[in-house]
């Protein structure tokens, strides 16, 4: 799902703002934030 060294890696990186693949802990932090309580 995250081919950082596959044949289309350079093309995928050209669309990314930070020019690198995300780490698992970064994705987990976002998931926890989105699943958390809403502030209204």
Image (cartoon, rainbow, N blue to C red):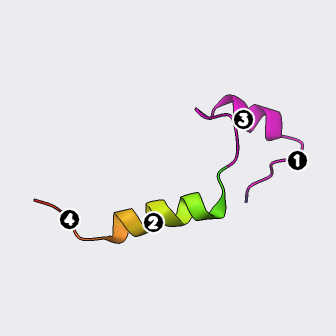
Q: Circle 3 sits on which residue?
A: 13
Return the disc, 1 or 4, that comes first in the chain's sequence: 1
**Is the residue marked by circle 3 packed among few (<14), some (14-19), or many (20+) residues within 10 Å?**
some
Measured along the vertical axis of the image, is residue 2 above or below residue 8? below
| Range covered by the magenta-colored residues | 2-21
Distance from Cα at disc 4 to Cα at disc 2: 13 Å
As drawn, the label of residue 6 is: 1
Q: Residue furthest left?
A: 40
Q: Secondary structure at mark 3?
A: helix
Distance from Cα at disc 1 to Cα at disc 4: 38 Å
Q: Nearer the viewer, residue 35 or 12?
A: 35
Distance from Cα at disc 2 to Cα at disc 3: 22 Å
- For residue 39: magenta? no
Return the disc, 2 or 3, that comes first in the chain's sequence: 3
Q: Quadrant of residue 24?
A: bottom right
Return the disc, 3 or 4, that comes first in the chain's sequence: 3
Task: Report the residue at 72% width, 35% height from top.
Answer: 13
Q: Nearer the viewer, residue 25 or 2?
A: 25
Q: Circle 4 sits on which residue?
A: 38
Disc nearest the viewer among 2 and 3: 2
Q: Circle 2 sits on which residue?
A: 31
Disc nearest the viewer among 1 and 4: 4
- For residue 13: magenta? yes
Return the disc, 1 or 3, that comes first in the chain's sequence: 1
Measured along the vertical axis of the image, is residue 2 above or below residue 32? above
Measured along the vertical axis of the image, is residue 28 above or below residue 10? below
Q: Secondary structure at mark 1?
A: loop
């Amino acid at each position: 799902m995250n081919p950082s060294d596959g044949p289309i890696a350079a093309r995928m990186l050209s669309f990314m703002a930070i020019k690198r693949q995300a780490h698992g802990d970064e994705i987990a932090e976002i998931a926890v934030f989105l699943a958390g309580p809403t502030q209204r």
